[in-house]
Image: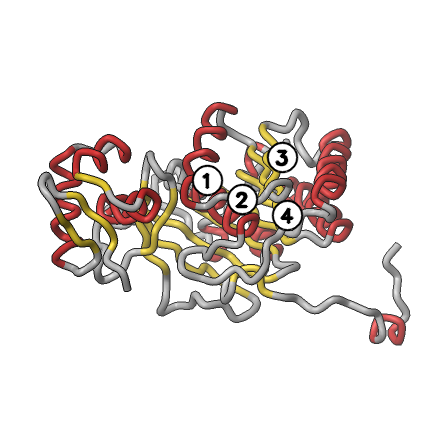
Amino acid sequence: MNLYEAKELAHLPVQASRPLVNGLLLTGDKVLLVAKPKVGKSILSQQLAHCLAGQHPFLGMGVPTQEPVLYIAGEGDIDELQSNQRNISMSLPVAENKLFYWSLPEHPFDTPPGRKSLMEAAELVRVRSGGYPTLTIFDPAQFLMEGSLVEDKDVRMFLRVVNFYRNLTGSTIWIDHHTHRPIRKPSGELIEEGASAYTGSQAWEAWYKVGLLLKKTEARSLNLSLMSARRPTCLDDERSIEMFMVEPTPLLLVEKSERITRATEAQAVELLRLKGRLTVRQLSETGGKSVSAMETAVERLEKAGMVISEGYPASYSLMKS
């Protein structure tokens, strides 16, 4: 029982938070990432896992230390998870015994056997990596809990287990969450739900320290913005992160810039970063895009001063800074 007399609490040795992703994520955080299905939140979360386990910058933000990560996948087949892991690893490799995937847990975590299996998974990570996972990703909540996403009582039951796990392991928690369907009156009029309009329950709102929203834009890019936070972050009402999904090879999200304005351009840059020098046809075959699309991409990148061509047929490489 965590019962403290006032002076005991005042002198309790509590470890100060430290950054996991500069400006975005701290140790001890409770983060809720909200998005519609099939937007890309799982790829974003897997990319975060790879960045921490391999100490790579996350969307341009520094990662100070390499950390053990537990990624709990509540949906998708094992072959899809494996394919994503391999394609993300092309750009963001990880160290051995730093990133652990748990595919399709048998029991919901808001049940006794589910709670037990969650603690056992953390213990396995501790044995193999030398410490409990610094970050644990639950993706998504709806397939890892038995109760309803919108009933406060059910959400609180799930979050009690998550909080118990967090207190036991010291792990930072990141939960992927689907936006719920709009609630309408019998007349068809939308019901105003206030802060719960995205999450579906006030219990979610009360739980997280940082709430993030991932949306598709009209320009076919993705936008990561802040819903709300109980501490300062690099995101605020005026700043969000716009990015492109690079797929299928490699697989990752790349921040949009003045010189990279299309997803195919971002993919070409990543492939040249990995391979060194490629022709348009090689870029097309490696990246799974048409020759014409890659030709347009490298032409734009060359005009922007990001790549240089030589020889015939032309081969391209990144311009040295």
- Inter-mark Cα distance, 4 to 1: 16 Å
Label 2 Cα crowd, 10 Å radius (few <14 / some 14-19 / many 20+): many
| Quadrant in the picture for the C terminus | bottom left
Disc 2 marks which amino acid?
A: Val
Q: Position of residue 237 (x, y in %)?
A: 39, 68
- Inter-mark Cα distance, 3 to 1: 29 Å
* Residue for point 74% across, 66% down: 15
* Residue for point 13% across, 41% down: 295
Q: Position of residue 65 (x, y in %)?
A: 59, 59
Residue 289 horizontal side relative to residue 241, left or right: left
- Inter-mark Cα distance, 4 to 3: 24 Å
- Inter-mark Cα distance, 2 to 1: 7 Å
* Residue for point 74% across, 47% down: 130
**Residue named by callout 4:** 68
**Residue named by callout 1:** 89
Disc 4 marks which amino acid?
A: Pro
Q: What SS does tag 2 mark?
A: loop
**Residue named by callout 2:** 94
Label 4 Cα crowd, 10 Å radius (few <14 / some 14-19 / many 20+): many
Residue 107 horizontal side relative to residue 319, left or right: right
Q: Nearer the viewer, mark 3 or mark 1?
A: 1
Which color scheme does this rendered protein use? secondary structure
**Residue named by callout 3:** 145
Label 3 Cα crowd, 10 Å radius (few <14 / some 14-19 / many 20+): many
First-in-chain label (4 vs 3): 4
Residue 223 horizontal side relative to residue 170, left or right: left
Front-most of 116 and 136? Answer: 136
Is the residue under label 1 in contact with that under label 2 (CB below 8 Å)? yes
- Inter-mark Cα distance, 3 to 2: 29 Å
Front-most of 79 and 144? Answer: 79
- Inter-mark Cα distance, 4 to 2: 10 Å
